[in-house]
Image: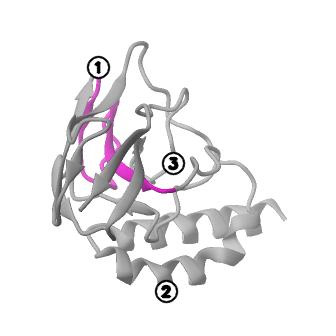
């Protein structure tokens, strides 16, 4: 049974790694394929150093913006690396759009609400429907699993014209 759970966990991580850099609309099929693996046991989490944090450089909380929305990610106390790179005190960004944080014991989902930047990007442009949106950042380790403790930004709210 433990081997089956480990195999499912590795499959989920592989699907997450393959999703890096994809457009949000391409994540839905990957998410549907990974759903059976959602029942896997908690995985070992990579430690994060004291004081590590991620934050939005832009946009700012309360900003009104237009499409495409330019987002710049900030990080302190850790470095940004590509998915699959297991360097200590490092990870890559995930953008949480209009959703709660995912289960922190599992790899971060890959769909329209959880956008992966496994290529190590710190700046991106996304298109959002007009209206109000909540954004939050979550750093993932080399396997897209949140660190322990998690390195997560405050949630911001923006309005897209």
Residue 4: quarter of image: bottom right
Residue identifier under label 1:
77
Residue identifier under label 2:
29
Distance, label 1 to label 3, CA atoms, is 18 Å
Few, some or many residues within 10 Å of mark 3 (<14, 14–19, 20+): many
Instruction: Please tell me whether mark 1 sits on a helix, a strand or a loop.
Output: loop
What residue is at 33 percent from the left and 71 percent from the top? 129
Few, some or many residues within 10 Å of mark 1 (<14, 14–19, 20+): few
Of the 4 image quadrants, the one containing the N terminus is bottom right
What residue is at 51 percent from the left and 48 percent from the top? 145
Chain-order first, disc 2 or disc 3? 2
Residue 20 counted in the magenta span: no
Closer to the camera, 9 or 154? 154
Distance, label 1 to label 2, CA atoms, is 35 Å
In the image, taking residue 52 as reference, residue 37 lies left or right, namely right
Residue identifier under label 3:
145
In the image, taking residue 34 as reference, residue 90 lies left or right, namely left
The magenta stretch is 77-98
Residue 86 counted in the magenta span: yes
Chain-order first, disc 1 or disc 2? 2
Which residue is most to the top?
Answer: 50
Distance, label 2 to label 3, CA atoms, is 20 Å
Residue 77 drawn at (x, y percent): 29, 20
Instruction: Please tell me whether mark 2 sits on a helix, a strand or a loop.
Output: helix
């Amino acid at each position: 049974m433990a081997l089956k759970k480990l195999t499912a966990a590795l499959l989920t991580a592989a699907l997450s790694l393959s999703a890096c850099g994809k457009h949000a609309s391409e994540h839905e099929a990957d998410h549907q394929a990974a759903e059976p693996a959602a029942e896997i046991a908690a995985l070992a989490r990579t430690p994060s150093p004291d004081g590590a944090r991620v934050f939005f450089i832009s946009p700012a909380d309360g900003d009104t913006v237009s499409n495409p929305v330019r987002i710049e990610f900030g990080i302190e106390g850790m470095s940004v690396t590509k998915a699959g790179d297991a360097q200590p005190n490092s990870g890559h960004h995930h953008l949480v759009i209009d959703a709660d944080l995912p289960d922190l014991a599992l790899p971060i989902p890959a769909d329209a609400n959880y956008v992966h930047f496994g290529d190590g990007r710190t700046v991106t442009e996304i298109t959002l429907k007009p209206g109000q949106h909540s954004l939050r950042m979550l750093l993932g380790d080399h396997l897209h699993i949140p660190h322990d403790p998690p390195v997560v930004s405050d949630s911001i709210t923006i309005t897209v014209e």
